[in-house]
Amino acid sequence: MYKYSTHNENNDISLHDCRATKILFTDNILSFLFKDGFYVCVHNKDNDKRKLSYTDMSEAKFKILYNDIIIYIFTETDDKDKAIRETISLDTLMEKINGGMELEFISVFKGYQSYIFVCWLWFDFEPYHKECEIILSADKETYYWNTIFTDDE
């Protein structure tokens, strides 16, 4: 289905500002599908410069080690200094995203076989988005795409 893939050992892939429009979980593989792609740093073979480019429709897959994926949704209260943290299941998040909401990735914190994604969950009514965190343990991450575009093209 895809022509290219990488395990992102050099941190050349960025999901920052990218929106997942579909989530799948099959055989302990958690997949985020990006209709508008994600960012890739392309290395110039003639010099040491890297160029930030982007892909077409793409996918990020994580081989989950433990089935205890933790997902928090934060809702602001009337007191703007406080928020309510709600835990939701992966099934609930998948239902929301696969039902039309989008999951925008803001930051990722990576450790040994552990990931914390800070995201925004976007929807079509006020307040239009809520902060979201996804915490998981994964053996590896693999990114897939067909075409890379640069601003020169």
Image (tube, rainbow, N blue to C red):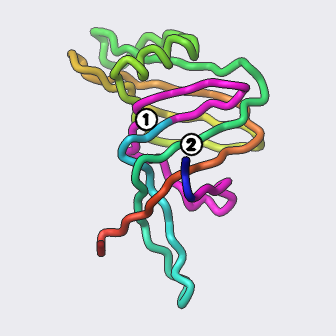
Residue 119 vertical position relative to residue 93 in the rendered view, above or below: below
**Left/right of residue 91 with respect to residue 21 in the rendered view:** right
Label 1 residue SS: strand
Tell me how far mark 2 sits from mark 1, CA to CA.
Answer: 9 Å
Residue extent of the magenta highlight? 4-32
Q: Residue at x 21, y 16 (%)?
A: 126
Residue 98, above or below 7: above
User: Which mark is drawn over residue 89?
Assistant: none
Decide which of 132, 28 is in the foreground and name it: 28
Closer to the camera, 102 or 31?
31
Horizontal and vertical percent for residue 100? 33, 22
Dot 1 alpha-carbon crowd within 10 angstroms: few under 14, some 14 to 19, many 20 or more: many
Dots 2 and 1: beta carbons under 8 Å? Answer: yes
Q: Which mark is residue 60?
A: 2
Identify residue for label 1.
Answer: 20
Which image quadrant is residue 102 in? top left
The residue positioned 72% from the left and 25% from the top of the image is: 27
Residue 60 sits in which quadrant?
top right
Amino acid type of disc 1? Ala
Residue 26: say if magenta: yes
Mark closer to the chain start, 2 or 1: 1
Amino acid type of the residue tagged 2 in the rendering: Ala
Residue reaching furthest to the bottom: 46
Residue drawn at 50 percent across, 81 percent down: 49
- Residue 135, by quadrant, is top right
Q: Nearer the viewer, residue 60 or 146?
A: 146
